[in-house]
Amino acid sequence: LGGRMVAGPAFMARACERSQRALGCDLVVVCGERVDPLEASSGVLGAVAAAVAPHGVAVLALGRIVQLDRRNAAHAAISATGTLVGSLEQDAQRFARAWQW
């Protein structure tokens, strides 16, 4: 049928690299269940952060479970992390409004 399998992180990295919308913004918010060293290094979060980092775009990583300290976040080009406690939409808006440079 012509289909192909593509890993999530690789797909997201290519999508971010090709998206003028992502590269033209000041902040990218990535939401997931977990924000941890594994996700930051080899997951979708890490792929997105690596794709936008060369363009100076800040990355805010939000998750229900956050186990990523500031040093590891900085190493992965993640500007800040936050814990989701309510609805995804409400929490993402709350964190984005509070964002400061």
Image (cartoon, helix red, strand yellow):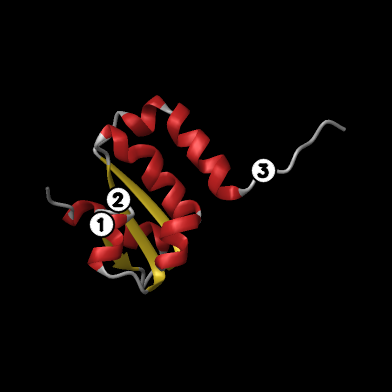
Type of amino acid under label 1: Ala
Viewed as shown, does residue 69 lie left or right of 20?
left
Residue count near mark 3 (Cα–Cα under 10 Å), binned few <14, some 14–19, many ≥20: few
User: Between disc 3 and disc 1, whose residue precedes?
Assistant: 3
Type of amino acid under label 3: Val
Q: Choose top left, top right, bottom left or bottom right for residue 72.
A: bottom left
Viewed as shown, does residue 7 lie left or right of 49?
right
SS at circle 1: helix
Relative to 81, does residue 66 appear above or below in the rendering? Answer: below
Type of amino acid under label 2: Ala
CB contact under 8 Å: marks 2 and 1? yes
Task: Work out which residue is located at the far left of the displayed protein and give it.
Answer: 101
Give the x, y percent position of residue 37: 40, 66
Q: Residue at x 33, y 31 (%)?
A: 23
Residue count near mark 1 (Cα–Cα under 10 Å), binned few <14, some 14–19, many ≥20: few
User: Gap between marks 3 and 1, in whole Å?
Assistant: 27 Å
- The numbered dot on residue 74 is 1
The residue carrying mark 2 is 77
The residue carrying mark 3 is 6
Q: Residue at x 36, y 62 (%)?
A: 62
SS at circle 2: loop
Q: Quadrant of the N terminus?
A: top right
Residue count near mark 2 (Cα–Cα under 10 Å), binned few <14, some 14–19, many ≥20: many
Q: Residue at x 42, y 45 (%)?
A: 48
